[in-house]
Amino acid sequence: MDFFNKCTRIYLEKEFEKKNNTLNVACWTELSYDTRTGWYKVTRRDYGVRHGQGCYEYKEQKPIPEPKDHEVLLQMDCVGICGSDIHYLVHGKIGKFIVNQPMIMGHESSGVVAKLGKTVTNLKVGDRVAIEPGIPCRVCNFCKEGRYNLCADIFFCSTPPDHGNLSRYYVHAADFCHKLPDNVSMEEGALLEPLSVGVHACRRAGVSLGTKVLITGAGPIGLVSLITAKAMGASTILITDIVQHRLDIAKKLGADIILKVDANDDENEQVKKVHELIGQAPDISIDCSGFQSTMRLAIKSTKSGGVIVIVGMGSAEANIPLTEALVREIDIRGCFRYCNDYPIALAMIASGKVNVKELITHNFKIEETLEAFEVARSGKGNPIKVMIHCRK
């Protein structure tokens, strides 16, 4: 079945037949066909599923899963929409991760423990938890070395071919569920995921007391990198973006300097402006956009001997001034997801060192998931973080 060209055929690998404008799917439910839009509509909506490039829909009820011995059953509470969710929706892939069949979305999430597996001892029923979405194999060299984010056999929510957790109930490995203290909300628990990306980026970059930092891109990841760098002691942070609204939020979150840029700006003039505003070349640059232009700006702006961390995923290839980075001994470091960063991110929120609630601009019920994704995709209403609430 070609899910990219026949997006209305939408139940995993189950066969179906169309009879009298009604789709009978594996005897679970009926979906009525809308002749005006060409979409099938379900009666009960519980699963947010991507099922082809540019197409998404809810799914019917499935049985509540049973946790394995090392797992917990979670009643899902909050699920944020990530930029990667939108990228899969619009483009159907990110790098080597290609959507070839319908996929349940969601990986920025929190929930309440509803049932324990037989061997689980670190949690109890009723605990509120943040869900770290990546479960590694635990036995490869990367896992043993403590870099489990590089594990080749990692399961990662809503990354093809792995389903996410935008549902009412979901099972997950207990040791990758982080118990929330009473002063941390479920929304903040879900935001531990993007915050952990910012923590990992700043740790990879070596941000410390007195560091002067350039951040390119004031989207959600740029903003969490900003508040993390601030909490880690950066003395001056300049953040760039093409959208003034995002820069205004960055200023509110603690950016020392904001700089609106344009794709047509002269590159050398941008570099000169960065140096003038900071008062010197930045020690560290964190690229949260993934565009060729922002990576070039980071390389040309960063001081000799400095560090650049690339967080944003853009095109698979880019034309960047590598010789300049070589002769000036600029370290260019990749940053992929996070590793042992959730506890740090949780401590930052629980202690009041960072405020992530300001990132949430839109809230939706799970029944409104299609609208939530459309807001996140279109940018209508200047969304930063769109949050879906799963509990009734």
Image (tube, rainbow, N blue to C red):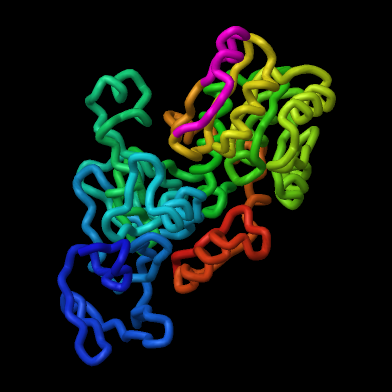
Say which residue appears at 30% left-offset and 30% top-offset: 151
Looking at the image, residue 183 sits to the left or right of residue 178; the answer is right
- Asked if residue 134 lies in the magenta stretch, the reply is no
Foreground of the two, 281 or 159: 281
- Residue 15 point in image, percent of width and height: 15, 71
Foreground of the two, 126 or 186: 186
Looking at the image, residue 100 sits to the left or right of residue 307; the answer is left
- Within the image, what quadrant is residue 74 found in? bottom left
Q: Is residue 273 above or below residue 113?
A: above
- Within the image, what quadrant is residue 173 found in? top left
Which residue is most to the bottom? 20
- Residue 206 point in image, percent of width and height: 58, 18
* Number of dots carrying numbers: 0
Residue 128 in view: no
Foreground of the two, 236 or 358: 236
Say which residue appears at 46% left-offset and 33% top-offset: 317
Residue 179 in view: yes
Q: Is residue 4 above or below residue 259?
A: below
Magenta residues span: 317-332
- Residue 338 point in image, percent of width and height: 45, 33
- Asked if residue 319 lies in the magenta stretch, the reply is yes
Q: Is residue 356 above or below residue 76?
A: above
Q: Quadrant of the N terminus?
A: bottom left
Q: Is residue 89 above or below residue 70?
A: below
Q: Quadrant of the C terminus?
A: bottom left
Say which residue appears at 58% left-offset and 26% top-offset: 202
- Residue 278 point in image, percent of width and height: 80, 24
- Within the image, what quadrant is residue 235 found in? top right
Say which residue appears at 47% left-offset and 56% top-offset: 79
